[in-house]
Image (cartoon, rainbow, N blue to C red):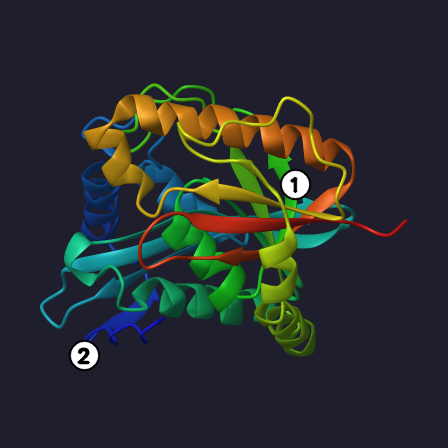
Amino acid sequence: MDHPAPAPPSDLVIRDLVTHEDRVQCVALQEATWGAGFSERVPAAILLVGPKIGGITAGAFTPDGRLVGFVFGLTGVRHGVLAHWSDMLAVVPELRGTNLGTRLKAWQRARCEVMGVRVIYWTWDPLVARNSHLNLNKLGARVDEFVENMYGVTDSSQMGALPTDRFVAAWDLDDVRIARRCAARADDAPRLDAAPLVAGGPHAPPPARWPDDDAVRVAVPRDFPALLGADPEAAAAYRRHSHAAFSHYFALGYQISSFHPAAAGDGVYLMTRTTP
């Protein structure tokens, strides 16, 4: 049973990063999240100048001024329309699972709507189930594309030496469209039960011959970061197998229809063939 997440503390304030100390805290939170000396971190100077051309740098602060979560993104043109690319979001460990990430996304969305943005994009690792659940089931985003090894092999403590395969999320800022998408995903259980499993971990490699069904399943670990630390070989198997499945089926026009988390065992993506 999927229990509601606890709420974050009610006295948190979400606001722009406005001081040098705010930005120093943001850089420190990036390193605490992705590893000390993380080379992909956004430096304080970019956190400062990004908002001057439509970017967003915002954080959640405690009453005593401690930064406990942040979101950062830039605004530009994608597919010919004004769009916002949400580049980073992080929350301190003790507040993960409290919907603070959802609150930060909602704040970001409201700012984007004021600017006339209609779509927000960002990337996430398909193997991180908690982010898949947030992005697809809670926010109602869709998968715009699958990108192989998008950032190359990074020095992030969360990724190790594995390729950085990513989904690009597209969040259409249309409440009716999002509601319809979430309702359709909630009704996917019958198709999920009938779809063949085409990739998973060490004990569920891709089949010798890819099924041609209208719907297929791809399994991902319940807690990929923990698995990476405890069993790197198993984590690497999930990466290899999911990469093979996503590359094959996206090339054929399949899309991610829904994601189904599990309290125990693997989470599962349902991929369905799109109608021409």
> Is residue 237 visible in this depiction of the protein?
yes
Residue 92 quadrant: bottom left
Label 2 secondary element: loop
Q: Measured from the top left, where is residue 137 in percent x and y?
A: 50, 65
Q: Do the residues labelled 1 and 2 touch (CB within 8 Å)?
A: no
> Is residue 151 visible in this depiction of the protein?
no
- Give the residue at the far right of this rendering: 276
What residue would you read off at disc 1?
A: 145
Report the number of discs: 2
In the rendered structure, find residue 265 and report the number of the disc placed on it.
none
- Vertical placement of 112 versus 79: above or below? below
Q: Which amino acid does label 2 sit on?
A: Asp
What residue would you read off at disc 2?
A: 11
Residue drawn at 18 percent across, 53 percent down: 93
The answer to whether residue 227 is left or right of residue 47 is: left
- Vertical placement of 152 versus 126: above or below? above
- Give the residue at the far left of this rendering: 64
Q: What residue type is labelled 1?
A: Glu
Q: Measured from the top left, where is residue 101 in percent x and y?
A: 35, 62
Q: Nearer the viewer, residue 10 or 275?
A: 275
Which quadrant: the N terminus? bottom left
Q: How crowded is mark 1: few (under 14 residues within 10 Å), some or many (20 or more)?
A: some
The answer to whether residue 72 is left or right of residue 24 is: right
